[in-house]
């Protein structure tokens, strides 16, 4: 099961030459600077743009294939669309806006009551859009798109128009939907926080080209990709809670083939959590230090070393048993530890520097 996209199109300012394949279901985030081609992919998948050359196949069904003359019109593609602005019908109640999606769709697995509960909009059903907050309007827009029984949900920067408080309000609902409905989703964003919390697969796009594509934990920690150059660069690991130690005020998580201790979590044993480890918080060592406060000393191997574009630091990508870390250190540290590709290294990580996403 996969989503395959091949797209060639000439715009006056940029030539688009996109190609990638990602597994489904799951959230695939398209990430890159403005004008890179992200929204062009959304438009082509929805059938709103007919590119010069295009092949889009989801789970074996071709939505478009210019080589063989296949071009399904938008109404036959079963796409759910969510944009920056909610685009709700102002004269309709929330309930009527939601049922508009149902009326235009063939019967499917997504039920009205289920969507209302997942999105927490039961108390809003009788209200009109102008009485809702920005976050509430977007939750209703997402609900309407889901009730159209989509084969693919297309979300073009759905949180871009919201302030930080409204984003924080809606993110838990997006996480719940991703887990509960298991739909394939193409999601465009400029926010690395949204990438870290939602993405299963990550497609990095720049100037109309794919420069990186793969599972989020793999791409987020690539020292040779633009994400690593950001001040907020960091690795993402998919973990499971395995132990709580109230006496030490610590919880143990396992993921990426390693064990990590974090400040005590109010989370059941066995629960899955995503964690993010900022590159600036990962200290490197050649041997285990004595009498140190750091709880996490993680063995790994240097996969690659890349210069920071600003010239003041170096990025070290560290291969774990089943994952990756990234560390930002000085060039002097590379010399001091004699680091090179393939060399063993220890990553020292404070428990308090590990971010639990969606907590």
Image (tube, grey):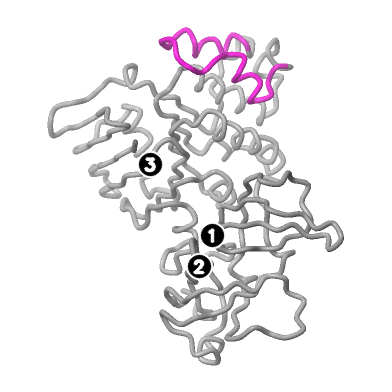
Start-end of magenta stretch? 95-122
Q: Are marks 1 and 3 in contact (CB under 8 Å)?
A: no
Q: Cα distance, mark 3 to mark 2?
A: 23 Å
Q: Cα distance, mark 1 to mark 3?
A: 20 Å
Residue 280 is situated, as x and y percent measured from the top left of the image, at: 62, 71
Q: Is residue 204 left or right of residue 47?
A: right
What element does badge 2 sit on? loop
Residue corresponding to mark 3: 23
Residue corresponding to mark 1: 256
Q: Is residue 290 left or right of residue 87?
A: right
Name of the residue lying farthest toward the right = 247
What element does badge 3 sit on? strand
Q: Are marks 1 and 2 in contact (CB under 8 Å)?
A: yes
Q: Cα distance, mark 1 to mark 2?
A: 7 Å
Q: Is residue 348 left or right of residue 15?
A: right
> What residue lies at 35% left-to-right and 39% top-to-bottom?
40
> What residue lies at 83% left-to-right and 60% top-to-bottom?
249
């Amino acid at each position: 099961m996969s989503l395959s996209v091949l797209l060639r199109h000439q715009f006056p300012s940029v030539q688009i030459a996109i190609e990638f394949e990602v597994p489904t279901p799951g959230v695939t985030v398209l990430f890159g600077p403005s004008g890179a081609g992200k929204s062009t992919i959304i438009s082509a998948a929805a059938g709103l743009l007919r590119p010069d050359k295009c092949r889009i196949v989801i789970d074996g069904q071709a939505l478009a294939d210019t080589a063989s003359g296949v071009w399904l019109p938008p109404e036959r593609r079963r796409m759910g669309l969510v944009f920056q602005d909610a685009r709700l019908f102002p004269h309709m109640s929330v309930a009527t806006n939601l049922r508009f999606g149902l009326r235009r769709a063939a019967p499917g697995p997504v039920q009205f009551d289920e969507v209302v509960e997942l999105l927490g909009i039961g108390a809003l059903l009788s209200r009109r859009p102008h009485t809702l907050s920005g976050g509430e309007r977007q939750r209703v827009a997402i609900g309407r798109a889901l009730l159209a029984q989509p084969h693919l949900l297309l979300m073009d920067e759905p949180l871009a128009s919201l302030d930080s408080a409204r984003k924080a309000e809606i993110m838990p609902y997006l996480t719940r939907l991703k887990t509960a409905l298991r739909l394939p989703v193409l999601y465009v964003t400029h926010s690395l926080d949204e990438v870290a919390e939602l993405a299963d697969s990550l497609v990095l796009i720049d100037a109309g080209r794919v420069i990186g594509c793969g599972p989020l934990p793999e791409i987020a920690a690539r020292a040779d990709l633009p994400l690593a150059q950001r001040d907020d660069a960091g690795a993402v690991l998919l973990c499971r809670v395995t132990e709580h130690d109230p006496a030490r005020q610590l919880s143990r998580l396992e993921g990426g083939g390693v064990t990590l201790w974090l400040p005590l979590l109010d989370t059941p044993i066995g629960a899955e959590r995503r964690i993010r480890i900022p590159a600036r918080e990962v200290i490197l060592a050649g041997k285990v230090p004595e009498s140190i406060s750091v709880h996490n000393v993680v063995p790994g191997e240097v996969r690659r070393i890349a210069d920071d574009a600003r010239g003041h630091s170096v990025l070290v990508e560290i291969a774990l048993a089943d994952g990756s870390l990234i560390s930002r250190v000085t060039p002097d540290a590379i010399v001091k530890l004699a680091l090179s590709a393939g060399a063993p290294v220890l990553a020292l990580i404070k428990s308090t520097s590990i971010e639990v996403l969606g907590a």
